[in-house]
Image (tube, rainbow, N blue to C red):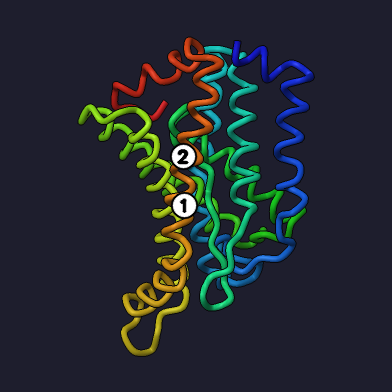
């Protein structure tokens, strides 16, 4: 039922009507959490790109397995990508002129695993860099690593742990989405600290400085994102519990798809 709803013209129109205003209202410039174009030294840009490429290749394999399991999941996968695009394009100014934003990867991680989110995040980040001036091409590897690799992996681990401790599903989803947002911001802070260590205190002092800049806005954003993810998941589950059960059942086992 869920897939048929997404495929219907009415369902697509409702989705477009809900997301288009957010897309059009998204800011046209950026500073950080998506690290902006040209901000990182070339050495670090190449390093994070090299680190991210293996995860991207594994992500394509993961999506291939998901599509082989059920080709109808492609619509739900596209919906997860659209959720990342819209949510991560919304930015809240931080205390020093930088900005914080949700990531949106928690929902897709719960449904498809963390590796698939590397692919979706890469696609989203490319479009945002080209169309919204949000992030950049030279910093794409760094942004993919923080939002599309570190965040989903941490969210997946937290979700598995929460489910094994018999927490209610809604609470597991909340913690997973919250963790994805917070870990993304912490990894971005580390990336900036490694590239720009302070003269007094080095990388550690720089990490504290960057993390403190984002913390004021990112913590409430992460809480809000967790609540929103729970609400979206509940809507999807109410329309297609049987279809989602096929995706959620493997989560009882420890694997990444």
Secondary element at tag 2: helix
Residue at the (39%, 39%) spot, across then down: 174
The percent coordinates of residue 78 (x first, y second) are 64, 29
Q: Which sits in the foreground, 198 or 247?
A: 247
Residue at the far left in the pictured view:
165
Q: How many marks?
A: 2
Q: Tell me which numbered mark, 2 or 1, is placed earlier along the sequence.
A: 1
The percent coordinates of residue 223 (x first, y second) are 42, 50
The percent coordinates of residue 162 (x first, y second) are 27, 34
Residue at the (74%, 54%) spot, across then down: 25
Residue at the (76%, 42%) spot, across then down: 20
Residue at the (49%, 35%) spot, across then down: 107
The part of the image, by quadrant, that contains residue 182 is bottom left
| Mark 2: few/some/many CA within 10 Å (<14, 14-19, 20+) | many
Residue 137 falls left or right of residue 218: right
Query: Is 205 placed above or below 191 here?
Result: below
Residue 56 falls left or right of residue 22: left
Residue at the far bottom in the pictured view:
200
Task: Give how far apart the Cα atoms at labels 2 and 1 are.
Answer: 21 Å
The percent coordinates of residue 242 (x first, y second) are 48, 10
Q: Which of marks 2 and 1 is in front?
A: 2
Q: Which sits in the foreground, 187 or 30?
A: 30
Query: Is 29 placed above or below 158 here?
Result: below
Secondary element at tag 1: helix
Which residue is identified by label 2? Answer: 106
**Could you tell me which quadrant the N terminus lies in?**
top right
Numbered tag placed on residue 51 in the rendering: 1
């Amino acid at each position: 039922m869920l897939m048929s709803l997404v495929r219907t013209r009415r369902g697509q129109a409702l989705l477009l009507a809900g997301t288009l205003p957010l897309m059009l209202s998204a800011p046209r410039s950026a500073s950080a959490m998506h690290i902006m174009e040209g901000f990182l030294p070339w050495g670090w840009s190449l390093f994070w790109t090299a680190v991210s490429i293996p995860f991207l290749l594994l992500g394509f394999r993961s999506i291939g397995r998901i599509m082989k399991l059920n080709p109808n999941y492609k619509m739900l996968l596209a919906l997860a990508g659209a959720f990342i695009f819209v949510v991560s394009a919304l930015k809240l100014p931080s205390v020093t002129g930088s900005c914080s934003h949700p990531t949106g990867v928690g929902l897709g991680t719960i449904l498809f695993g963390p590796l698939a989110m590397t692919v979706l995040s890469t696609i989203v980040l490319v479009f945002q860099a080209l169309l919204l001036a949000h992030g950049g091409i030279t910093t794409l590897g760094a942004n993919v690593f923080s939002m599309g690799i570190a965040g989903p992996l941490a969210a997946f681990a937290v979700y598995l742990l929460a489910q094994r401790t018999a927490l209610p599903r809604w609470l597991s989803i909340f913690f997973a989405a919250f963790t994805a947002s917070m870990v993304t911001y912490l990894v971005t802070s580390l990336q900036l600290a490694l590239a720009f260590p302070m003269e007094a205190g080095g990388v550690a002092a720089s990490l504290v400085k960057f993390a403190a800049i984002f913390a004021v806005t990112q913590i409430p954003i992460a809480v809000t994102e967790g609540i929103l993810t729970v609400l979206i998941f509940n809507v999807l589950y109410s329309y297609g519990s049987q279809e989602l059960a096929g995706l959620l059942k493997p989560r009882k086992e420890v694997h990444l798809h």
